Image: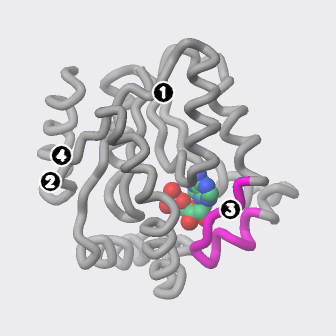
Amino acid sequence: MFILILGAPGSGKGTQGKILAERLGLPKITTGDLIRKAMLDDTPLGLEFKKYYDEGKLVPDSIILGMIKEQLDRPEAKNGAILDGFPRTAAQAELVDKTLAQRGQRLNHILLLDVTEDELIRRMRARAQVEGRTDDSPEAIANRLQIYQRDTAPLIAHYAQRGIVHRVPGTGSVEQIALQIKRIIGR
Ligand code: AMP
């Protein structure tokens, strides 16, 4: 089963994705984590990522599509995965749809974590104090929210046509939200 967790930055995708992946015994593929790892390791790709990441901008598709394909083709993801942080653009969605279709698979569920903008900003500022991410500056936060609305939110309509989008109110305790997701997925 392939499940995409979609939502604005700060909506809790990472937290809920982890709980879901552990419960279903599926790998979680998180582009943000892969990007942060490449930056920490100072790989040539990591240096390229940093130019966009620190400003809260999306890494261009021309650089990231290859990484996404590689992740989907890993043997661990043969029968399913939780996708966290991608697809985030129309080109990425096309790649994911095509890669899965070639294997006779598809995205089964899209969980859309719905959180108000005020709450998103509050959470990202709080997280900035704890994690100190380089893209948690006020300017980068503003960029990330704007880019989500512009590039990623339109994917909701793309997937809604297939009737696989479930809107999950993303406010409440972590446990309450996890329980709602469990009810939606049925396990
Ligand atoms: P995240 O941890 O998902 O909030 O992602 C943090 C940052 O990593 C984003 O602001 C982008 O710079 C980059 N990033 C993560 N996933 C993607 C993606 N699928 N496409 C492009 N950039 C990404």
Spatial CA span between label 3 and label 4? 29 Å
Magenta range is 49-61
Secondary structure beneath dot 4 equals helix
Amino acid type, callout 1? Ala
- Which quadrant would residue 70 be assigned to in this image? top right
**Residue closest to the far right:** 44
Residue at the image point whose x is 50% and y is 50% from the top: 85
- Which quadrant would residue 22 be assigned to in this image? top left
Q: Residue at label 1? A: 81
Asked if the residues shown at circle 4 and circle 2 are in contact, with their CB atoms under 8 angstroms apart, the answer is yes
**Whether the residue under disc 3 has CB within 8 Å of ligand 1:** yes
Badge nearest the viewer, 1 or 2:
1
Secondary structure beneath dot 2 equals loop
Q: Residues within 10 Å of mark 3 (few under 14, many from 20)?
A: some
Secondary structure beneath dot 3 equals loop
Q: Residue at label 2? A: 173
Q: Residues within 10 Å of mark 1 (few under 14, many from 20)?
A: many
Q: Residue at label 4? A: 177
Badge nearest the viewer, 3 or 4:
3
Q: Quadrant of the N terminus?
A: top left
Q: Residue at label 3? A: 59
Q: Residues within 10 Å of mark 4 (few under 14, many from 20)?
A: some
Amino acid type, callout 3? Val
- Is 157 colored magenta in this rendering? no
Asked if the residues shown at circle 3 and circle 4 are in contact, with their CB atoms under 8 angstroms apart, the answer is no
Q: Nearer the viewer, residue 98 or 32?
A: 98
Secondary structure beneath dot 1 equals strand
